[in-house]
Amino acid sequence: MNGIGTEGVWIIHYFGPLRVRPEIVCLSYDLKSTKEERDVIRNKNRKEYEKLRRQSRRLLKQTDENSRLNSNGSSESPYSEPSSPASEDVVSARESLSSEKGSSDLEFSENQSSSVLDRSSSSRRVTSSSPSVICSDSSDMGSSEDEQFDEASSPLSDEENDVDVASKGDLSPPKTNPQSNVCRTEDFASWQRIIRLDAVRANAEWTPYSPSQAAVSEDRACRSAEAVGLKDYDHLEPCRIYHAARLVAILEAYAIYDSEIGYCQGMSDLLSPIISVIEEDHMAFWCFVGFMKKARHNFRLDEVGIRRQLNTVAKIIKHKDSHLYKHLVKLQAEDCFFVYRMVVVLFRRELNFEQTLCLWEVMWADQAALRAGVGKSAWRVIRQRAPPTEDLLLYAIAASVLQRRKQIIEKYSSMDEILRECNNMAGHLDIWKLLDGAHDLVMTLHDKVATT
């Protein structure tokens, strides 16, 4: 495939997901690029990823050494489990946004859901103000031992597949030059700890969709875990060990690549479906980078991006159903903070694995259509439905709330009750009804919401 034409985008969007290739849609590839051009970029991306993994291994070694030195020389280590209020906030956030606790990740308690709304900025990142070790390109040219990349002991795929991918676009996060911000050892140690906690708690919902990874041998799974320093996985099956090791490897690399964001609870939810359908780690990493170009504002400390999206959801509801909106105002819930979790992890907690891929792929098809220059007028020629939009997720979230307007208006008298209702949607949503509702809202409200 040399690219996705506008007709292909339309077919995917209209008839539902036909396994949109995330490596093409997420990475903002030039749709006219050739196989040879994509091969060049693919090889370059592989080397860049391997460099990030070497830096990650050095930082892991550094934190382990510092931990041993501090444990021998003092009673408290800066890399040990903190007991500060900030660390308690991290645990609270992790309980709300991390993967399941030995059961389906669609199960959440009321307390877990509430803690999403109460967490402070310190729950997003744990950092230290002390001097730190930075990881840079120059530090990457270390010992010859570090330069060796052992694919046999890493969670990377054993075989190199010639996948037709490339990008002429910029894969760096918005306003962020990869590795332009220093990655402090203290930051990395904190991210590393939380990444591992989240990784081992990821469930096995993905296994029917990736038979080769589901059938991974115990030996290969354990080698993958050892390669990233993963521990405490004895209770997991080989496929979950392997999945957790891949999560750790890619999330640590991303924390170095985009050290302004680092790692926050919820990122593992976004990465898990990607690595389930893409078996090469370097490919999955760059797909995640492309995905995070749209989602990284969900994890910023200032939460400006989250609040903008919540405001858009509120505007959609206000324009579509003034009665429901007035009820939300009465309950002081017009900021729509009750859908916070849906926004942060892009409906991942409310939908099962297959439904998640379905929604995301339709979103990607919209984005691909916009990139291909399929505007509103062209879209009407192709189909009598909604034009592509960057905010399809927000319209879907608004649709899920509007579908429950009767219960909300007649039964609920506080935002906490609405929050429980939204969290109880998990496992009970019809994805096609949800997409139909979202497209109806786009058709009738897109211009009005955009202008306001």
Image (cartoon, rainbow, N blue to C red):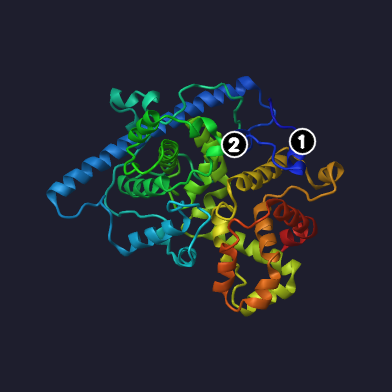
Residues at marks 1 and 2 touching, judged by CB atoms closer than 8 Å: no
Q: Is residue 36 left or right of residue 403?
A: left
Residue 391 visible in image? no
Quadrant in the picture for residue 325 = bottom right
Q: Secondary structure at mark 2?
A: loop
Please name the residue shown 73% across and 61% down the image.
449
Q: Mark 2 belongs to which amino acid?
A: Leu
Q: In which quadrant of the rendered image does the N terminus lie?
A: top right
The quarter of the picture where the C terminus appears is bottom right
Mark closest to the chain's N terminus, 1 or 2: 1
Q: Residue furthest top?
A: 36
**Residue drawn at the location 44% of the way across and 64% of the way down:** 119
Specify few, some or many for label 1: CA neighbours under 10 Å numbering under 14, 14-19, or 20 or more. Answer: many
Q: Position of residue 15 (x, y in %)?
A: 76, 42
Identify residue for label 2.
27
Query: How dense is the environment of label 2, judged by Cα within 10 Å: few (below 14), some, or many (20 and up)?
Result: many
**Can you tell which mark lies on residue 6?**
1
Looking at the picture, tell me which residue is in the foreground, 107 or 362.
107
Q: Amino acid at mark 1?
A: Thr
Q: Is residue 25 above or below residue 76?
A: above
User: Camera-side residue: 45 or 153?
Assistant: 153
The answer to whether any part of residue 389 appears in the image is: yes
Q: Nearer the viewer, residue 128 or 4?
A: 4
Q: Which residue is depicted at the point 29% across and 22% down?
A: 144
Q: Position of residue 28 (x, y in %)?
A: 62, 37
Cα–Cα span, label 1 and label 2: 17 Å
Q: Give the x, y percent position of residue 50.
A: 42, 29
The correct choice, above or below, for 448 with respect to 372 in the image is below
Outermost residue toward the left in this view: 73
| Residue 209 figure quarter | top right
Say which element carries label 1. helix
Is the residue 204 above or below the residue 5 in the image?
A: below
